[in-house]
Every structure is written in C-alpha cells, then in structure tokens.
Amino acid sequence: MPELNLTSAPAHLRHGSSIGQPLTRRDGVLKVKGQATYAADNHPPGMLFAVMAVSGIAHGRVTSLDVAAAKRHPGVVDVMTPDHKPQLAIDPEIKTNPFVFRMEVLQSNEVRYANQPIAVVIAETLEAATEGAVLLAPRYEELPALVGVDAGASFVPPVVGVGNPTENHRGDVEAGLASADKQIDAIYETPPQYHNAMEPHAIVAHWDGDGVQIDMPTQGLMLSLARVAELFGIAHDKIHIRSPFLGGGFGSKGLMAGPPVLGLMAAKLVGRPVKLVLRREQMYGPVGHRAPTRQRLRIGADGEGRLTALDHHARTVSSTFDDFYEPAADASHTLYAAPAIRTSHDAVRVNTGTPLFMRAPGEATGSIALESAIDEMAWACGMDPLAFRLKNYAEVEPITGKPFSSKALRACYDQGAARFGWAKRLLQPRQMRDDSGLLVGWGMGTATFPALMFQAQARAVIRRDGAGVMEIGAHDMGQGAWTALAQIAADAVGLDIDRVEFKAGTSDLPDAGIAGGSAHTATAGAAIHSAGAAVIAKLADLATNDERSPLFGAGNAGVIARDGRLIRRDDESRSESYAEILARAGVAEVEARGTGAPNPAAMEEYAMHAHGAVFAEVKVDPELGQIRVTRMVGAFAAGRIVNPHLVKSQLFGGMIWGMSFALHEEAITDRRSGRIMNANLGEYHIPVNADVPPLDVITVEEHDPHVNALGIKGVGEIGITGSAGAVANAVWHATGVRVRRFPIRIEELLTQR
Amino acid sequence: MKQFDYVRPATVAEAIAAAAQPGATYLAAGTNLLDLMKGNISRPDRLVDVTHLDGLDGIETLADGSVRIGALVSNADLAHDAGFAKAYPAVAEALLSGASAQLRNAATVGGNLLQRTRCAYFYDTASRCNKREAGSGCDARDGENRTHAVLGWSENCIATNPSDFCVPLVALDAIVEIEGRNGRREITLDELHRLPGNTPERESALEPGDLIVAVRLPPAARGFAAHARYLKVRERTSYAFAIVSAAAALRIENGKVAEARLALGGVAAKPWRARAAEDVLRGVAPTAGVFQEAAWRALTDAKPSGDNAYKIELARRIVVRALILAAAGTPARIAALPASPFASTSGAIHA
Ligand SMILES: Cc1cc2nc3c(=O)[nH]c(=O)nc-3n(C[C@H](O)[C@H](O)[C@H](O)COP(=O)(O)OP(=O)(O)OC[C@H]3O[C@@H](n4cnc5c(N)ncnc54)[C@H](O)[C@@H]3O)c2cc1C
Ligand code: SF4
C-alpha cells in the first residue's frame, strides 16, 4: 500500500489547539479523486477471483453440487466445498470468547439460513467465477423454515446485547400501574434491517509461506487478527491486516464473519492470492443484521402527568445456532423518571443468519417504541409531549439511581424546541395543514446513547527534527478518524496537525480496540492523549534535568508543550524547542506508549450517557397517505466535540437513519421460505436525497469530567435514537393515526380521510 | 456470468435477422436487461445491441400533427424536449417520475416499453415463477404481495407492469411501430402488453426478432395538453416504483369535459386504460362528484390478489386526485418533484 497522502494542513487550519476545530476530512481529496485504496482495490500479482455460491433454502441440507460442470467452465480454477477445502486449526463452532460468532465456512452440508455460503468458486476472472457458482446448480433436502417472531416456543436468553442482564427492575411496576390514572398498553413492531454499508464485505488474501497479508475492511483489526490466528493456527505476528478505509460498517464489519474466512481458505487452497467480494444480495445473511422486535410497553401516569410505572418487554429473534439478542427494552433504563421500571426480553429461534450489532443495537429499536409510547401517554394526559418529558425528566438514572456524570438534556430540549418553533404546536392531531392542503405534523423524541469506553493503546514519538509520530491501529469507517484522532494527537504532543505523522488502519500498530459502541474517538483518543502526555514527559525529563537547558530545574513547576516547544509553566519566556532538546541530548527520538481504558471507579459512581432532543415535521397527503419529512432539528449533548464538522455529519447521518427506520427500512422476508425478497438497494428502501429535508443540528455545550480524560462521549449512534420516534410521532400528529408497526406504510394511513 | 455473443448490427434488417434466432435478445441501454442477466433471471445466448442503429433516435412531428418518437430516444431527452413536454405534459411528467436521473439518461423509449415486472419472486431465482419458468408455479400468489396486481391478474401470475411512461401513453392512444421478419406493422400500445391468463411467460405481442422502432402519438393526443397530469404514489419521494399511479387527460370545452382519458399504473400486468371511467366523464362538468363516480367505474372489476386490497381504495383516490389536478390545468412548468403528491408543497402554515 503506498503511503497515504492525506491532506496535512487544510487551508482553514487554525494553529494552536487542534481539538474543537471544524477541519474537513483529511482523506477527502483522496476519496473524491478515487485514490483512497479500499480493500477490493488491491490486486496482488497472480490474484484469482472467488465467488460464493449461497443457499436458496433457509433450512435443510445440500445434497448435491455439480462441481464438474463448474470446473469445466473456462477460467474456473477450483471449487471449494465441504469435501474439498483446507483444514482449519479449530472448529469454527467453538466460541473461544464472547466476541466470537459462529460462521458458515463449509464445515458441513447443513443449511441454517437463506444466503448461507455453500461453496466457493475460484477462477481467473470474476465473470468465470460467477458463472461457475451458477453452474453448481445445488440440490437440497429442504426442511420447514422457521420465520418471524412467532416461529416457535419463546425462551428467555441468559443475556442480551453484550452481556446485559435480560431483566432489570426497580420498584413495583404492577403497583405503579394499578395506582395510575392513565395507562398505556401498546405493542410496537420493528422489522429486520440490514446494515447495507455502501462497500460490500471484501477480502484480498495473500498467503506467503505460513504468513498472510490481508486487505479487508474491519472495525476491529485486533479481534479480526486474533480470530484469523486461531482459525488458521498461526502466530499473530504472521498476520498483517490493512484496513485504511471502510466504506461504512455500522457494526457488520466489527467481528470476523464467514465470507472473509472463506477468502482466506480459498487463497490457501489454490496457493495464489484471492479476492472475494460479496454481491449486494449476499450481504443479507452471513454478515449480520438488526433483528426484528415486537415490544410491549405498559406505562402508567398519575393525574399530574407523572409516570408511576414503565414496563418494557421486547421479543426478538436469534439464529438457530448462535446467540445475539437485540437489547431493545434496555432503552427504557435511562430517560424517564418512573419510580417503578421493569425491562425484560424473550426470544425465538429462526432460520436466519445470526443477528448482530447494527448502529445503535437495542437503542434504536427500543427508542422508537419507547418514544412512541411516551408520546401516546402525553396525549392521554392531555399534555404537550415536551412538557410531559420535562415533567418526567430524570435527575438520576432511573434504573440504577446513580447520578449522571453530566447531562445537558434540558438544554437540548430548550435549544432544539426554540430552533424548531415547537411552542406553536397545536396539541390536537390532524389540525395543521399547509397552503396546499397537506396535513402537517410535529413530533419529538429524546435521544440517548451510553458513553462507553473500551481498551486501546497508542505509541507516540518525537523525532530529532521536532516532528511527531502517533501510531494507533484505529479505524476510519467514513466517520473521520483520520482527521479527528489526528487532531487529538496533535494536541497530545503539542504540535500543529501538519507536524504529526498520524498512522492508523493496519494491524501492526498498537491495538485501538473496536470501532463500535460510539466509543472509538473516546477510547483511541484517550490512548493517544496518554501516549502524547507520556512522550512529552520524557522530553521534559531530558530538558529539565539538563543544566544547559533554559528549562533546567523546572521539574516542579512543570512545563507545557505548545507549538513544538516546551514552555516553563510559571515563566513562559523560558522555553526550548523539541528539536533543540533532542539535539543536545544526542538522541534520535523519544518514544512512549499510552493506554485508554474505562475507569471502573467512575463507572461505579456515575451513569454515563449522551443525550439529545429531536424535533421533526412531516407532511402527509390526507387522501393518498404518502409521507414526507420536511424539517428536522436535533440538539445533542455529547461531551467534548473534537471536530464540530465531522460530528455534525455523524448526527445528520444518524437522524437520516432514524427517519429511514420510521418510514423506509425493512427486509421483506417470505413467511414460508425465509428468503429475503428485497435484497437489493433498489427495493430495500433507504431515504434518497428527495426524502432528506433540511436538517439542523445543534451541539449543546457539555463538560464531563468523569467519562474519560478528554470528556468525549461519542456521537456515532445517538442520532438514530429519538429521531425515529420523532418522525413516527409527527406522523401521528399529522394524521391522528397511531401506527405501531414500522416502517409506517401508506395503507395504514388510508383508514381515515 | 454466462458467456454470450454480442453483435452490433449495422441495419434494422440485420438486427432483426440476428435477433430472430432462438436465445437472442435485443440490448438497448441495458438498465433492466443487464440487471436481469447479472441475477441469472435472463440468460440470453446472444445480445443484439441496437443502440448503434441509425435513424431511431429522433423526435419528429409528422404532417398530420402526430409525433413520432424513435425507439432509441433516451427517457431524459424525451422528457426534456421542450416541444414534446408542452404538447404531452403528462408523458413528460411520467418519464421524470421514473427511476433516477442517471437511469433516465441511459434508458431508451423501446427499453422502457419492454421493461420486465419488478415482482420480487420473478427476480429471485430460488422462487417459483411462471413468468420466468413457464409452469413452475407462482410464489407471489401466497407470498409477500402487497404491491401486486388488483386488475387483470390470473391465478398464474399477479405481477404488475412497472412502467410509468406507458401509463399516459396508453391513455393517449399511442401506437407502436414494429419491424419484424415479415416487414413493418403497427399496433396500439394497449395491444403491446398481454394480461397473464394461462401464459404469463408471454408478456407482449412481439414475435421473435420484432424490433420496436418508434412510438407514435396520434394527432388527437395534442388536444389534452391544457389538462393533463400524471400522479404517482410511492414509498419514498423519488427513485421508487409506483404503488399505484394514474394519468388523467381532459379536453374541456365550454366548462364541460368533451373527452377524457384515464389510465392506471401499478395495478395490472399492463398499463390499464380505464375506458368505462372515461365514458362517465364525457359531456359533463368536471366536478368532484363525477370524478368519484369515474373512480368507482375504473375499479369496478378490481379484486385483491393478496395482501393488497388497500391498492383498490388507493387507486380510486388517485384517480380522483389526478382528475382534479388535470381539471385545474397543466402547470406552466413541471414541478420539481414530478408526479408527486408533494409536487406543490411550500412552507407549513396552520389551519
Ligand atoms: C433501480 C431502478 C429503478 C427504476 N425505477 C423506475 C421507475 O420508477 N419507473 C419506471 O418506469 N421505470 C423504472 N426503472 C426501469 C427503467 O425505466 C428501465 O430499466 C428502462 O426504461 C429500460 O430501458 P433500457 O433502454 O435500458 O432497456 P434494456 O434494459 O436494454 O431492455 C429492456 C428490455 O427491452 C427489450 N428492448 C429494448 N429495446 C427494444 C426495442 N427497440 N425493440 C424490442 N425490444 C427492445 C430488451 O430486449 C429487454 O428485454 C427503474 C430501473 C432501475 C434499475
Ligand atoms: S406474480 Fe408472476 S412474475 Fe411474480 S412470481 Fe408469480 S408468476 Fe412470477
């Protein structure tokens, strides 16, 4: 991979502190010129093309594959099947840790879901491999498919999400409901959704002896590396993964899935580099999805509109062979101050690829149900939805009673409502029209997402010439890590951003943890921050202990690093440049490592969440039922904002996704076969430009001394939460029709004229 | 991908000879055909690329006042031809409501007429489909069929024709000019697409080798320019096929409807001309009441083919709205969101 030629000094760079500046992305020019190398852009000499054949049935067995026909096709080199494949070092069904998911890598002829890989054809050209896969003409012994949230007997899973308890409660929910003046008991349904990153999953695998070079988009370089190591029985240092850019991941590229492993196996089988790229429809199966849910909310409120109880139960599905449970009901833990709360989950097993984290897993599904139910309760109490939320504002985290590390939600409500003009909203639904007669509705939702931290390391270097290097195996999924983390790095070593060489995106760099849970900037940023502080401390030692330095003896007073110089804290006239310090000390460079990690003591003491308030306007044709969102305002408080420009983009993206959740996205599953009938971007609808209204994002000032050293909470996922409910509530306000099955469809609005 | 021959004939006669062979198919812009080939739904042995044939890419007004559109004119060029859009505003509006700007730039008139259904089971080769494989069954019949046909369907196939363009064309009595092995012939657009009956695999009146060379709008079609609209309800604001659509065109004289044209899209295997509804409107003043009546007439024979009864009510409402819009008069310029119920939205105000 050629050195990345990132824009180092954008024209509008303000010198001095980098954090907080709205820099445009430094990889932007590369991307618009088509020069950013994504995994599938790599073509090592001698590379072959691999194409997966996938199952047409959702449950059963492959009884035959016409391998001979495929092999006869000109250009086909080999066909990998359960009978003809390299041996793996361990059984991929064994879960060696909670972040290992079972995968289908041709270990048997069993079929567990539609679109499961059942063979891989390897050929000189993509076209030959594609046709080879067709010529396999699989035959099956088919068994009935389990489809949908009522497919079978339900059970209570041991945990939901990543190790969350399946049930939580505080207070007496039944008593709270019994004492309530108003009650809501409603069922909301959300469909299966697929990540559909623009860049499909891809791998270019290149074995060299017992080592392997892998080009593959991943949100978790080290987890992927460890999985490859155990599956192929090779040492970590024999594996090199490059993932400088991802064309989106949204959770589906977090953990090693089956298809890239098949690419590695195929390359091993034929002894040549192999490229395997999923077709769009092949992404609807082996690489995860958001599970469907059916959620029941029971809420009670007293005569003044104060919540008395909140009971949130979520039914979801997992695959027949592995466990991931969408923690939808957990969305009710943090927002509303009900004295009694209970959340619970159950699940059924269906013939599907195992569901997985998908942008705001649990939070998104749970939020649209909770925010709809809160809206219904506000209406039942005859209250404005914002007034109702303020009345039930949680001063401490309702489920735990812990204080918040910081919570500027009130300011979000205030600023968002003011910008939107919420005060002019009419309480009754179906009262507002525009001048062409369309129904107009205003809805709101509260956004929330936990402020998480994982583990990360970074390595910082100050070179003889006074420039800096920061190394961390961080991931740019399109969110802007190349820019935001470099800004943190620049401040960490007291240099302008153009004086720091920022290295990321490969597995030979220090482990940056997974890019997920909206925690990457916080986690990697904390590691960078601490590595920078450590390297500056070493530099300071060199200076303050050397009599020839103007900083000699400043050890107690301390020095600060700024603009490539160490400056005596109590006397800014005394300073020395990094280059001078290193030159005099006669060392080529100083180096130090740092780590980022959650602080268990702070977590014990505080509830840590980002918050926001989203306001939406929709228009609905009163007779025809077609819906259009015409305006959205989101005000978010997410701690320190490293780069306002990138943060806005993340929040815009989240808000659009929320609108997509309410109105568009759904994988339509055939209820008999379990096949997904709209596995393409023509028919799996997401909003197009004409659907996206003017969006307004306000980032509300929030200072959080507890979440991490930098006070960062993360903005990757929160934008979906609140937004989906705001749009759904606006549709109700426009039409007077409460739709509880998402996405909202035209036919549901035709009931009334 | 299956290997295939690619031929690029120099003349229409050569094209017909090449395409009359079994396994041969015409290739226009390929925006539908190539997708079908990549998905293994169509597996032709030979593609006969017609995009280089001369003389098929013009829009000409004939002496009698009809307009003749060459089969290779792109959807975008036709919609943006100022003279054409003025004379046939509903056709331009329909074209601009279809697909995306990129697709419209590529897609041809001939290809649009012959685009295949979007029935998901037709596209899914693991499903049974009588249209794709005659006699194999129809998995849509008891499947996910909320967007399927409510008119003219049979037990063998409940698919719809997805074209927007064809809807106003059939309303305006468009004529299709065909060159075939036995020379030139003409049929009405209404005769081009077949209802499924027992042979859903036979979609059109074309014989092997038949090439559509032009579409003609007869002189009378101009008479509706002042009152012609296309309206399309879809599940996002743009870039989606119609759930239901309607083209309505009126000739209003002395406050009365001298002649009405009405067709529905997204409801049947062909663009659906609603002649009975047109009869209701002839000679009466254009009022909401008669529009309602026309809408009921248009859907008299409709019945759900599955989870889609709502489409019948929706179709009635679209007919009424399209007629109201047409009666109000063709706008001076096509709206920024052509054919959309949101075509004319502005800022929100309170009731
Ligand atoms: C994502 C997507 C969204 C779309 N949305 C819409 C929409 O909203 N509304 C809409 O109306 N359409 C829509 N379309 C369909 C689009 O209009 C058609 O794909 C296009 O019009 C086909 O034209 P073409 O020139 O590319 O035809 P091709 O794909 O080249 O050909 C289509 C068929 O016509 C035959 N054919 C082509 N020309 C001739 C001829 N002269 N004589 C005989 N046979 C011929 C071919 O053999 C082939 O069977 C959409 C398509 C896509 C991919
Ligand atoms: S409706 Fe028609 S096109 Fe669809 S599966 Fe049935 S036969 Fe095929």
Image (cartoon, coloured by chain):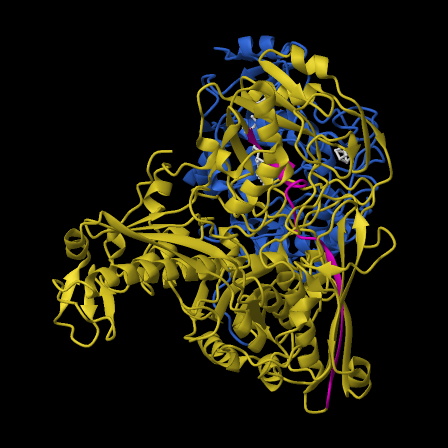
* Ligand 1 located in image quadrant: top right
* Percent x, y of residue A388: 62, 83
Q: Is residue A297 magenta?
A: yes
* Percent x, y of residue B257: 63, 51
- Residue B214 in sight here: yes
Q: Which chain is yellow?
A: A
Give the residue displayed 67% in from the left and 72% down from the top.
Answer: A332
Does residue A476 sit above or below B4 in this rendering? below
- Residue B212 in sight here: no
Give the residue displayed 78% in from the left and 85% down from the top.
Answer: A176
* Percent x, y of residue A68: 71, 12
Which region of the structure is painted magenta? Answer: A276-302
Q: Which chain is blue?
A: B
Q: Quadrant of the C terminus of chain A?
A: bottom right
Left or right, B109 with reference to A589: right
Q: In the figure, residue A400 lies in which quadrant?
A: bottom right
Does residue B130 sit above or below A735 in this rendering? above
Does residue A142 sit above or below A251 in this rendering? above
Q: Nearer the viewer, residue A710 or A462?
A: A462
Q: Nearer the viewer, residue A151 or B48?
A: A151
Q: In the figure, residue A428 lies in which quadrant?
A: bottom right
Q: Is residue B191 magenta?
A: no
Give the residue displayed 44% in from the left and 50% down from the top.
Answer: A474
Q: Quadrant of the N terminus of chain A?
A: top left
Q: How many callouts does the rendering have?
A: 0
Q: Nearer the viewer, residue A312 or A531?
A: A531
* Percent x, y of residue A89: 66, 32
Does residue A397 sit above or below B189 in this rendering? below
